[in-house]
Image (cartoon, rainbow, N blue to C red):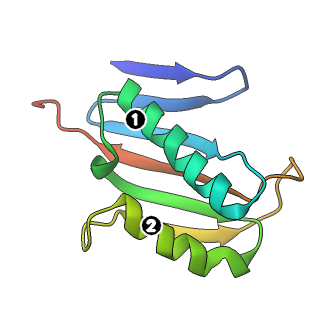
Amino acid sequence: MVTLIPTPYSYSSAVVAGEYVFLGLHRGFGETFAQQLHDAFDQLQKTLLQCNVSLEQLVKIHVYLKDITNLPEMEQAIYSYFEHNRFPARMTTTTEFVDSDCLMMIDGVAYSPISQ
């Protein structure tokens, strides 16, 4: 069975397929990189809750940065969302975004055993 968490756009914010939750892009809003990063994680957590999954069940995230100089700040923030030594696998890349005010986005995969 596949469950979709729709958006008003041409993608789903999440697709639950079996024991996996595939997360579409989550962007944060705010004036600063820090505000956008924390808002993106807030949005990510809300989507995961709709799928009955917690942030701790993320097994892979991909962080897209507009500016690589934000990497150290992102690294520090990651520590506030995950238990030490319990981080998901991660890829970080830089890219341009369609929205000029967008400084970062996150997508990922969570694992939720059906027996839960």
- At x 40%, y 24%, the residue is 50
Q: Amino acid at mark 1?
A: Leu
Query: Residue at horizontal 57%, vertical 40%?
Result: 24
Q: Image quadrant for the N terminus?
A: top left
61 vs 19, nearest the viewer:
61
Tag nearer the camera, 2 or 1: 2
Q: Is residue 9 above or below residue 73?
A: above
Which kind of residue does numbered mark 2 sit on?
Answer: Ile
The location of residue 13, given as percent across then percent down, is 56, 32
Q: Which residue is farthest right?
A: 100
The outermost residue toward the left is 115
The residue indicated by pointer 1 is: 48
Q: How many marks?
A: 2
- Asked if residue 23 is positioned above or below residue 37 in the image, the reply reads above
Residue hosting label 2: 78
Q: Quadrant of residue 93?
A: bottom right
- Assign the C terminus to one quadrant of the image: top left
Image position of 45 (left or right of 6)? left
Dot 2 or dot 1, earlier in sequence: 1
Q: Residue at 73%, 25% (x, y): give it.
A: 9
Query: Where residue 92 sits in the image (x, y, percent)?
Result: 58, 70
Answer with left or right where residue 37 lies relative to residue 99: left
Secondary structure beneath dot 1 equals: helix
- Of residues 42 and 3, the one nearer the viewer is 42
Place of residue 36 in the rendered image (x, y in percent of width and height, measured from the top left): 67, 53
Q: Residues within 10 Å of mark 2 (few under 14, many from 20)?
A: some
Mark 2 element type: helix
| x 86%, y 47%: residue | 99
